[in-house]
Amino acid sequence: MNNTNNNKGHLFAEERKNEIVEILNVQEKILVPELVDYFQVSAATIRNDLRDLEHDGLLKRTHGGALALVFPTVGFEKESEIKGYEYLTQKHAIAKKAFELVEEGDVIVLDAGTTSLEFARLLKEIKNITVVVNDLEIARCFDDSNGIQVLIIGGTLRKKFHCTVGQFATKTLSEINVDKAFLSTNSFSLEKGCTTPDVSQAEIKKVMSDIASQVIVLCDSSKIGITSFVQFVPAAEIDILITDNDINQITLQKLIDSDLKVIVADG
């Protein structure tokens, strides 16, 4: 476990225990050696922390580590207008990193979402690209862009999310090929990949990933370690995951150790 310059050794016991709980909120289990390496304290100190946290009903101790009592899930999806006000700094930082991956001449597909909208606003600076979208709000932001060809996917309107879904949309998408798919997600974990609460949204995101030569996921750190109802991309099929620098370092190292390419955007 990489512990370079994490500055955790000075934490008070309660601060350290709070952070252990936060770590278990984004991954199901943790080992004592990982926590020793991360916090730069002794194994005995970590075991005492875990004992206290178990006594408080916040985790379950195991031989050599601890387990989360409940792995967090997302059971519903917030409307776009609500999500648009959340984690704006992180979303903008992620969008800037995604922008760096777009090359002149690319054909790309963007799914619906507030992070995708931040990304789309930056794309207006690039000339000679084709953008495939199913989000009406994203399509509108290209209205004054002369150098970008925009293909809007028709289908059934998903109300309050201003995007198209359904069989017509997925059939249209399945007949084209793109260089890169930039997909946002409601939640991500190594075990379940990218997931979303809505079946129709999962269907169209899955097709977008299937038609792309490269799959790039835009995921702020608050969504990592959470599982939603329907999977649309397994972790093994993601080429690049872009997140923000609020990601927990132990979680980040686990992603890297899994051979997933992770780009961390500075907020």
Image: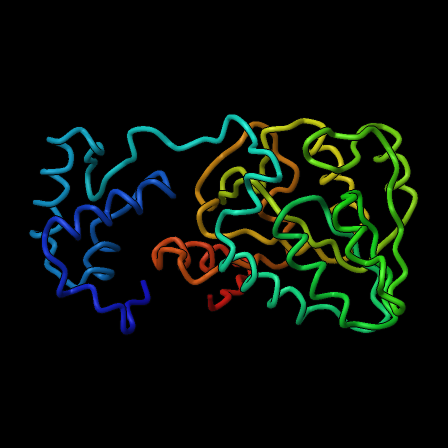
Return the x and y of residue 138 as percentages of the image width and height: 75, 50
Number of labels in the image equals 0
- The answer to whether residue 149 is above or below residue 197 is below
At horizontal 70% and vertical 33% (from top left) the residue drawn is: 201
Res 105 quadrant in image: bottom right
Res 53 quadrant in image: top left
At horizontal 41% and vertical 54% (from top left) the residue drawn is: 254
Q: Is residue 253 left or right of residue 77?
A: left
Q: Is residue 118 left or right of residue 252?
A: right
Quadrant that contains the N terminus: bottom left
Return the x and y of residue 71 as percentages of the image width and height: 38, 32
* Residue situated in front as seen by the camera: 56 or 190: 56
- The answer to whether residue 145 is above or below residue 26 is below
* Residue situated in front as seen by the camera: 218 or 81: 81
- The answer to whether residue 11 is above or below residue 68 is below
Q: Is residue 217 left or right of residue 157?
A: left
At horizontal 40% and vertical 58% (from top left) the residue drawn is: 246
Res 148 quadrant in image: bottom right
* Residue situated in front as seen by the camera: 158 or 73: 158
At horizontal 79% and vertical 44% (from top left) the residue drawn is: 136
Check the image and tell me how it is coloured.
rainbow
Return the x and y of residue 60 as percentages of the image width and height: 21, 32
Return the x and y of residue 39 as percentages of the image width and height: 20, 60
